[in-house]
């Protein structure tokens, strides 16, 4: 039976998008959409595993996926893909290239 941990806002407060990326081999495509603008780039690295992301955010993994709202940010993740939607409507997607 999984252990449910209470939320720890102090851990999440200092997380940045880069926290989900592991340096090393591979390429990631980053897409940021904001008020009709779209920025797309490719960076070196790989996404952390879904389990590692869940641990960082203090949420549970269900069926190999994360679908949660953390500190006002809607987070959806599955293997090789992370999507974040912020309160102001901006969206960011990081996925394997």
Image (tube, rainbow, N blue to C red):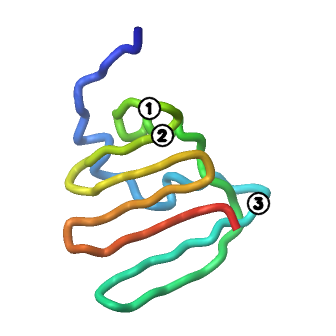
In terms of secondary structure, where does tag 2 sit? loop
Say which label, 3 or 1, has the lower sequence index: 3
Q: Residues within 10 Å of mark 1 (few under 14, many from 20)?
A: some
The residue lying toward the viewer, choosing from 25 and 69, is 69
* Number of marks in the rendered image: 3
Residue 78 vs 63, above or below: the answer is: below
In terms of secondary structure, where does tag 3 sit? strand
> What residue would you read off at disc 3?
26
Screen quadrant of the C terminus: bottom right
Q: Marks 1 and 2: CB-CB under 8 Å?
A: yes
Q: Residue at x 39, y 91 (%)?
A: 37
In terms of secondary structure, where does tag 1 sit? loop
Residue 81: x and y in percent read 56, 55
Distance between the alpha carbons at the discs numbered 2 and 3: 21 Å
Q: Marks 2 and 3: CB-CB under 8 Å?
A: no
Q: Marks 3 and 1: CB-CB under 8 Å?
A: no
Q: Residues within 10 Å of mark 2 (few under 14, many from 20)?
A: some
> What residue would you read off at disc 2?
65
The residue lying toward the viewer, choosing from 49 and 65, is 65
Residue 15: x and y in percent read 38, 53
Q: In the image as oriented, which residue stretches furthest toward the bottom?
A: 37
- Labels 2, 3: front one: 2
Residue 90: x and y in percent read 31, 75
Which numbered tag is attached to residue 61? 1
Q: Residue at x 32, y 64 (%)?
A: 85
Q: Residue at x 51, y 76 (%)?
A: 31
- Labels 3, 1: front one: 1
């Amino acid at each position: 039976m999984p252990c449910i941990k209470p939320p720890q806002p102090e851990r999440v407060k200092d997380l940045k998008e880069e926290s989900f990326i592991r340096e090393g081999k591979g390429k990631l495509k980053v897409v940021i959409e904001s008020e009709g603008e779209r920025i797309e780039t490719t960076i070196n690295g790989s996404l952390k595993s879904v389990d590692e992301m869940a641990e960082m955010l203090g949420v549970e993994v269900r069926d190999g996926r994360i679908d949660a709202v953390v500190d006002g940010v809607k987070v959806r993740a599955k293997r090789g893909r992370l999507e974040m939607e912020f309160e102001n409507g901006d969206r960011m997607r990081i996925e394997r290239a």
